Image: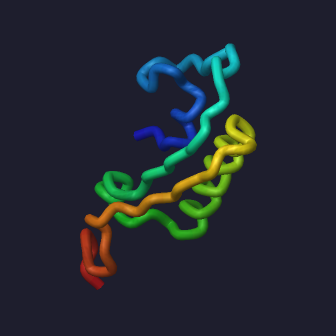
């Protein structure tokens, strides 16, 4: 039940210890694709989701200061799915 913000620093997501060493190279591109399975537990509270998403992007930007970012939304998410209305 952890979020990507909690998992981001872990080289192995199932191990609680964050990485102590810097990246061996700087990423040339960062792709962030979040939101599809996050909705399985119900719709997130909008302000909390935006705050967490922004914090994740800030941490990623600190790791890749010159890389372009591509933010992706799943085609499975629509106004009426997975929660009609």
From the top left corner, tell me how far across and down residue 54 is, in percent.
65, 56
Q: In which quarter of the image is residue 25?
A: top right
Q: Which residue lies furthest to the front in this view?
A: 28
From the top left corner, tell me how far across and down residue 30 is, in percent.
56, 44
Q: Residue furthest bottom?
A: 85
**Left of 56 or right of it: where is 43?**
left
Determine the residue positioned at 32% across, 52% down: 37
Instruction: Give whichever of 56, 71 is nearer the camera.
Output: 71
**Left of 11 or right of it: where is 64?**
right
From the top left corner, tell me how far across and down residue 39 is, in percent.
34, 59
**Left of 18 or right of it: where is 80?**
left
- According to the image, what is the colour scheme of the structure? rainbow
Q: How many labels does the image show?
A: 0
Q: In which quarter of the image is residue 77?
A: bottom left
Determine the residue positioned at 59% across, 63% down: 50
Q: In which quarter of the image is the N terminus?
A: top left
Q: In which quarter of the image is residue 38?
A: bottom left
In this rendering, the answer to whether 17 lies above or below 4 is: above
Determine the residue positioned at 60% across, 21% down: 18
In this rendering, the answer to whether 49 lies above or below 32 is: below
In this rendering, the answer to whether 14 lies above or below 34 is: above
Instruction: Give whichever of 28, 45 is nearer the camera.
Output: 28
Determine the residue positioned at 53% across, 55% down: 70
Q: Quadrant of the C terminus?
A: bottom left
């Amino acid at each position: 039940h952890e979020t990507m913000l909690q998992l981001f620093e872990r080289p192995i997501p199932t191990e609680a210890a964050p990485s102590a060493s810097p990246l061996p190279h700087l990423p040339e591109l960062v792709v962030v694709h979040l939101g599809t399975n996050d909705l399985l537990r119900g719709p997130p509270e909008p302000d909390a989701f935006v705050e967490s998403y922004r914090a994740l992007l800030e941490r990623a930007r600190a790791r890749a200061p010159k890389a372009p970012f591509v933010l992706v939304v799943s085609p499975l998410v629509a106004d009426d799915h997975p929660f009609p209305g």
